[in-house]
Image (cartoon, rainbow, N blue to C red):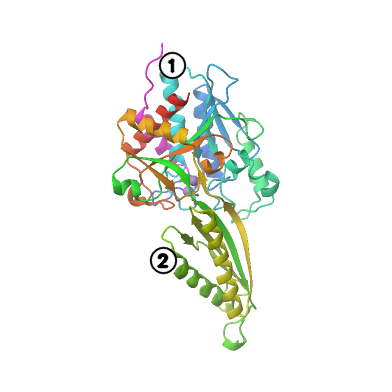
Amino acid sequence: MSRKPEVNAARLLASVADFAAIGATPAGGVNRQALGIEDRAARRLLAERALARGFTVFQDNIANLFIRREGRDASLPPILIGSHLDSQPTGGRFDGALGTLSAFEVLEALSDAGIETDRAVEVVAFTNEEGSRYSPGCMGSMAFAGAGTMADWEPIHATDGPQLADELAATLAALPEAALRPTGHAISAFVELHIEQGPILEQEDVPIGVVTAVQGTKWLEVVFSGVAAHAGTTPLEFRKDPMGAAAAAIASLQSAVMPADPEARLTVGRITAEPGSINVIPGSVTFTVDIRHPDAAILAAMDQHVRKECEAAGARWDCDVSVSQRVNMAPGRFSPTITGAIEGACKALGLKSRQMVSGAFHDALFINRVAPTAMIFVPCRNGISHNEAEFVTDAHMISGARVLLNVVEALG
Ligand code: HGY
Ligand code: MN
Ligand code: MN
Ligand code: MN
């Protein structure tokens, strides 16, 4: 005998707390970087909880982890819900985890209520969404959507050394109960719940964001090469100093791009000097540039602007320069059918909602290429994310999960 499925609030909040403990940092965040030990521990815990509920657990060759709850008709492509479990090095405990655990709560709520859906419902934890330890981000969802292959990425090394192929093998082996299946199986729809990672919902006091699109992202790597030399004996006019070139380039990029277009985002997040010794003029300086814009043509123009500014700085400082592209994520527009289902769920639950474009990239951006997709956002305090201070209220977590459950029932 079935009854109306309900989110079990206490269970969801306890689950978020349990996963926050895996890779917990003293400042209240998490360091659970892709394919590392903590990431594997989180995947293990989720798989164990899934098996305990009688769900099926499987993974694909890039270690995307799937949990399947059967429906009446196994021939129908399943509804897919979920997000990612990997984090930034000083990440928040909600980014990715909240979407994955809310999706698992939906499966549990359906089972508790004895609901039999027409089609199966699957939860996914995509591999390496963040891209911080292994670049690019969204590896798992790109592979699932056919937008990238293992052959492209296996040779890549993590920022702290290991090779992707080795850690991938270890990650797959760590879940012997999870059958290995080819990536990219058919799905009927994908819905990802995620924290907004920006300030809009909180400022407008709206509990649910209906994400209609995701802006485009490019990651560039800039290398200035000069001549390593002695800091004390080398007069300025004899120097080919790549640090000077990098500083000039970064200063002009940050002054020129931001005011021109309020929607443009440019971030220099990582810079390294070789050999990195206090009394050696560097031989080379490498930095990353993350650029974003909702309009593909403007994003391309920003890319050209970065290259032009770096070439000009290289010429001024008599250094060579190379600019290589590490990530190119075109903007994506989500399915009106799915955004409509999310808005319908909010109405049914009496929750205010507003449509918005995501400033962050997400796995949904790629899954959107193979199935009708959309996202549900919940507010986070002061819009802070990719920071250990990331925080989401219990009420917003529970509202988000209730909307997700309602959407799955509507799509089921
Ligand atoms: O960088 C991003 O947009 C994502 O949050 N990893
Ligand atoms: Mn995320
Ligand atoms: Mn993130
Ligand atoms: Mn994301």
User: In the picture provided, is 193 more to the left or to the right than 230?
Assistant: left
Give the SS element for disc 2: helix
Please state which amino acid type lies under the numbered disc 1: Gly
Q: Nearer the viewer, mark 2 or mark 1?
A: 2
x and y percentages locating residue 261 in the rendered image? 43, 62
Whether the magenta-drawn stretch holds residue 14 is answered as yes
Magenta stretch bounds: 1-22
Q: Residues within 10 Å of mark 1 (few under 14, many from 20)?
A: some
Whether the magenta-drawn stretch holds residue 158 is answered as no
**In the depicted structure, whether residue 400 falls above or below residue 120:** below
x and y percentages locating residue 315 in the rendered image? 61, 78
Please state which amino acid type lies under the numbered disc 2: Pro
**Who is closer to the viewer here, 302 or 282?**
302
Residue at the spot of label 2: 259
Label 2 vs label 1: CA separation?
55 Å
Circles 2, 1 touching at the beta carbon (< 8 Å): no
x and y percentages locating residue 158 in the rendered image? 61, 53
**Who is closer to the viewer here, 372 or 154?**
372
